[in-house]
Each structure stands twice: as C-alpha cells, then as structure tokens.
Image: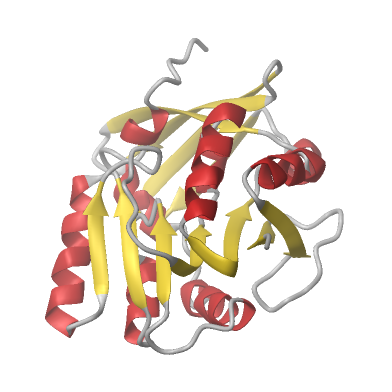
C-alpha cells in the first residue's frame, strides 16, 4: 500500500464512512463516557469543555445537555452543520467550529479538554506535541485533558491483525493493515461495501506511541499523566484491555 498521509485528518471521515462511524458506537457508550468525563474532571454547571475532533458531536451535545459550555471542533462540514442544528433546536450551550485541530485558534481557558474516539492517533510526534502545547496553554491550572485510544503500543501490538472484517448495519467493512516503523504506525486500507454494490475505499494512518512516549510528550507540553483506565466505569487499565482512557493534568 502506498498511502499519502499528509491530509489524513482532512479526508478520512468524508464519504459514507461518516455514517458508518455512527453505527460503530455501542448504545449507552456516549452517556457512560460523559458520566466519566464529568466525574474525572469534577465539572460543575457552566464549566467550559473543549471537544477536539468532535465528530458528529455525541460527547459535545451530551455535555451541553448537562449544562456545560462546549467548544466543539472538527474539520468535517457535515458534522459541524449537524451539531449546529441539534444544539440550536435544543438551546444547548455548544459552539461548533469548523477547523482542523492543529489550525484551531482557541480563546480563553477551559476546565477540561477531550480528544475521543482514537483521534489523537492521527498525529505524528511533532504534530502531537504541537497540539498538546496548544491544549495546555488554554487549560486552567490543574485542568484535565482526556485521550481515549485503542492505538497505543500496549494495545495495538497485542491486537494487530493484517486483515479483518465486520458487518456494520447494512455495510460490509473490510480492513487491511500494515505495521510500519520509523515512525511506528499502522497504515490501513479500509473498504466499505454497501448492499447496492457500491464501494468506498479509504486510507488511514494511526501513529503508535507507548505510554512512556506519551508521558514524555505530555511533559514537553506542561501536562502530566494522572490516571489510566480501561473503561469509563473506572476499571484501571491493565495489559490485555482493548482501549484506554488517559487522564492528563496541567502542571502547576
């Protein structure tokens, strides 16, 4: 596979995948994760939350329903329009912003920031540090940054498969993976087949960091790891878990 990774964050969710992604989210997960975010960050009504690479706004809208002021950033126009419509209809304090995470111009300070759905893995080390520094600069003292991922090295190496497939609603989803080095990353070719025979092929790259490497990146940005969980119900992360919730805190 020869993959152009330059603009992966700008194109990955275009086409039919933006609808497939919604079908991949299990019922109840969003509410459980927002319970977790609210508790772990000790959020109070009116607190400000930054939702980076927010997708179709499942966390942003749920946080808004609970009285938090949310800035929701994504680079896909269709998602931002959807969030704007839903927030407007329900009078939610959610401000959607159409921009890439690296290009976002943040204003003010936030009580918490989140980057869910494995989105942080889209960035290489230099991009990741740049984003972390931006987040840290706009977090209040002791503010919380939460990453949800299934592509840290401690997970990705254990569960790596060269090929896989699944049925997602009416779509058949075929996955071809290649583990590459320097930098460590997984390149993917993902084929989505619809019932009417139409096919969409998308390419992706997930950059793979160990927890120690992430800790070093956090510290360069003025953050430190506080806790690691394997589920939003606060099960401590252990080897063998299929996903992780990394809680980082702004250093004094």
Residue occupying image coordinates x 59% and y 61%: 146
- Quadrant of the image containing the C terminus: bottom right
Q: Position of residue 205 (x, y in %)?
A: 53, 29
Q: Residue furthest top?
A: 2
| Residue 26 vertical placement versus 19 (above, below) | below
Q: Nearer the viewer, residue 159 or 71?
A: 71
Q: How many marks?
A: 0
Residue occupying image coordinates x 20% and y 74%: 87
Q: Residue furthest front?
A: 252
Q: Is residue 100 left or right of residue 29?
A: left
Colour convention of the picture: secondary structure
Residue occupying image coordinates x 47% and y 46%: 134
Q: Position of residue 41 (x, y in %)?
A: 59, 76
| Residue 101 vertical placement versus 109 (above, below) | above
Residue occupying image coordinates x 52% and y 31%: 127
Q: Is residue 145 left or right of residue 80?
A: right
Write down the quadrant of residue 144 in the picture.
Answer: bottom right
| Residue 234 vertical placement versus 180 (above, below) | below
């Amino acid at each position: 596979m020869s993959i152009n990774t330059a603009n992966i964050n700008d194109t990955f969710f275009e086409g039919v995948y933006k609808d497939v992604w919604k079908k991949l989210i299990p019922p109840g997960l969003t509410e459980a994760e927002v319970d977790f975010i609210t508790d772990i960050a000790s959020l109070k009504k009116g607190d400000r939350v930054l939702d980076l690479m927010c997708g179709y706004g499942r966390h942003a809208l749920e946080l808004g329903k609970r009285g938090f002021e949310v800035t929701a950033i994504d680079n896909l126009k269709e998602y931002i329009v959807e969030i704007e419509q839903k927030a407007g209809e329900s009078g939610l304090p959610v401000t959607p912003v159409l921009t890439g995470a690296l290009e976002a111009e943040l204003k003010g300070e936030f009580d918490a920031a989140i980057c869910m759905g494995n989105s942080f893995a889209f960035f290489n080390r230099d991009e990741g540090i740049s984003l972390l520094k931006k987040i840290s600069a706009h977090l209040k003292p002791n503010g919380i940054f939460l990453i949800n991922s299934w592509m840290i090295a401690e997970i990705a190496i254990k569960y790596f498969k060269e090929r896989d497939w699944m049925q997602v609603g009416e779509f058949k989803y075929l996955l071809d993976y290649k583990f590459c080095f320097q930098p460590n990353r997984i390149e993917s070719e993902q084929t989505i087949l619809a019932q009417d025979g139409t096919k969409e092929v998308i390419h992706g790259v997930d950059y793979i960091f160990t927890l120690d490497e992430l800790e070093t990146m956090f510290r360069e940005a003025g953050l430190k790891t506080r806790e690691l969980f394997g589920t939003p119900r606060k099960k401590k992360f252990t080897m063998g878990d299929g996903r992780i919730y990394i809680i980082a805190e702004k250093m004094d």
